[in-house]
Image: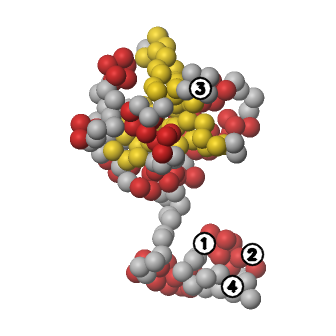
Amino acid sequence: DGAAPPNRFVVGDVKQSIYGFRHTTPELFQEKYLAYAEADDAERVLLSTNYRSRAPILEIANALRATRSEEELLDLIAQKIALLMDADRSTLFLKDDRSGELWTMIQEGRRSIEVRLGLGEGIAGWVVINDESALVKDTAEDPRFYGGVDYETQIRTESILCAPLRSASGSIGVIEVINPAPEFLEPASLRFL
């Protein structure tokens, strides 16, 4: 009959009530909101905390439509992700199929630092090889961590969120968020990346 499953209540339901069913009462929405908060199998996504409605994400979406160079776009994405997660840095590592490495350019003041990692090297390398995200709350305790990038950039990495970047043709690299605010060190942040 096309009815939504009982454990789903989405923004579209609100729009339907406003535009299609004008006689629906606000109490219905409040009742569902409270019922879903108590359900074990329900996942609530509040618009106030939903990443997709935050300004940095909207700026990235707008930049995708603008004509920009690939380097400018990648730099903008990394900057906005770092801003969104209140992180020290965010970096996009891309696969270089010719050399079999991951590479990125990191801006440190006025100098650019090219960083290359072997596939499988460091957390970023592990993520691209395993095509699986990694949440590392303490890099000192994770044997995958490679401190060479910290040495080159003079940044002390304490925690990392890292997720694979994929295109229609497969893995193209990873996005890494360095030292995000503690509230972002959770699996939901990896799903967002």
Q: Residues within 10 Å of mark 2 (few under 14, many from 20)?
A: few
Given this view, does label 1 or label 4 mark the residue nearer the observer? 4
Frontmost of labels 3 and 1 is 3
* Residue 13 visible in image: yes
- The first of marks 2 and 3 along the sequence is 2
The residue wearing badge 1 is 10
72 left or right of 111 in image: right
| In this view, the mark in front (2 or 1) | 1
**Residue at the image position 75 percent from the left and 29 percent from the top:** 67
- The residue at which mark 4 appears reads as 3
What residue is shown with label 3? Answer: 96
Label 3 crowd (10 A; few <14 / some 14-19 / many >=20): some
Place of residue 122 in the rendered image (x, y in percent of width and height, measured from the top left): 38, 33
Q: Which mark is residue 103?
A: none
Q: Earlier in the sequence, mark 3 or mark 1?
A: 1
**What distance separates the C-alpha of mark 3 from that of mark 1?**
41 Å
